[in-house]
Image (cartoon, rainbow, N blue to C red):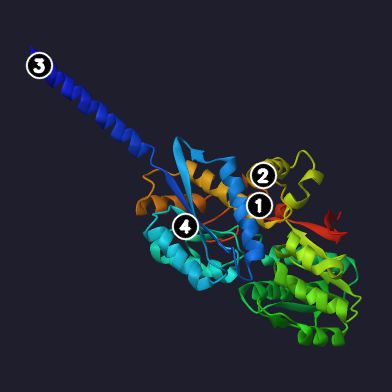
Amino acid sequence: MKVLTRICALAGIAAGLSAVTAASAWAADLKVGFITSLSGPVSSLGIPYEKGIKAAVAYKSELNGRKIQMVQLDDASDPSTAARNARKLIDEDKVDVIIGTAGSPGALAIAAVARETKTPLISIANANLPGEEGAWMVTLPQPAPLMVSAVVERMKQSGVKTVGYIGFSDAWGDLVYDALQKSAEPAGIKIVSNERYARGDSSVTGQVLKIVALRPDAVITGTSGTPGALPYLALAERGYKGQIYGMHALINPDFVRVGGTAVEGLLAPTGPVIVAEQLPDSNPIRKVSMDFRTAYQKANGAPPTDAFSAYSFDAWLLFLDAAARTKGEPGTPAYRVALRDSIVSTKELVGTHSVYNFKPDNRYGSDERSRVIVKLEKGQWKLVP
């Protein structure tokens, strides 16, 4: 009898241990790799992105009984470092998804690693790769054509006939210029210049002199963050009095601070989150945006004043929504494949910038609901009806 009792007891212990092991396996942590630029020329965007991911973690750090670990690395505004960071996160930290980074060149570098390792990438910089090259990435910032078309509509309403362009000499500058070409001509607006400069340049006097000499009705830039203020400063120094426009990549406090009076009156497209309190209660983006502001205040001790932190928050929402629909064991190649499939099949996910819909062959998930026009007045962005 004693032997039988002992056997039963051991069997009970074994069963208990088996149950604990199974529960532990079921509750394996989800891992998110986050890459941003905390130093270098893109840091004026990278730092807000970091604050946004802090707000996201504060908003929700558990999903269906699983904890969510977030591993963060700084790429110092260098695409090569961004790629190395991505490889480390995948090979050593075994992340299930990567969110990043602050600049388009860095995001494209990460995309190459994501494709090679079959790891989903949620890009928070505006980056696009066609076909199989971009099959493992989606992009949250609104595509340049969508936002440029809104600006061109505003230009046409304002009687603009000629426009000068100056942008970064990289992928973002190319995206904006290509979109401008496709929108301006049908609207009866002639592009008179295509000037470029590097993000790390300290002067654009030469480029702006050429633009001013052409006397365009308006000037638009394909830039972002603090370096994006250079053309407006140079235009003001040369006494340019035409209309000035920019893109949604300029909506951050450092740009406003550096640009000062030179960027007063600037018109730009942006996501609804920037003017969330002015949206009607019926707009679903309003509630999510206000939730974001609450989480941001909790995580950072101050309210948000930029558009970039909200992209990180939306990336987290996208990951949460997709992970909730994904079966399998986190930390495995099979799970990463399944998670990617869930991400690219997302339908009507309400974020702070947009209501997202993705397809396997479309990197962007935004539509017209993701854009408004704002004007900079006395250092504050105001909604333009």
Which amino acid does the dot numbered 1 rest on?
A: Ala
Q: Which residue is mark 1?
A: 310
Which amino acid does the dot numbered 2 rest on?
A: Phe
Label 2 to label 4, Cα distance in Å? 24 Å
Say which quadrant the N terminus sits in. Answer: top left
Above or below, 321 against 223 in this view is: above
Which amino acid does the dot numbered 3 rest on?
A: Leu
Does any portion of residue 273 appear in the rendered image?
A: yes
Of badges 2 and 4, the one in the foreground is 2
Residue 362, image x and y in percent? Answer: 56, 61
Question: In the image, which disc is placed on residue 4?
Answer: 3
Q: Are marks 1 and 2 in contact (CB under 8 Å)?
A: yes
Of badges 1 and 4, the one in the foreground is 1
- In the rendered structure, which disc, 1 or 4, sits on the residue that comes first in sequence? 4
Q: State left or right for residue 35 relative to residue 113.
A: right
Who is closer to the viewer here, 157 or 142?
Answer: 142
Q: Which residue is mark 2?
A: 292
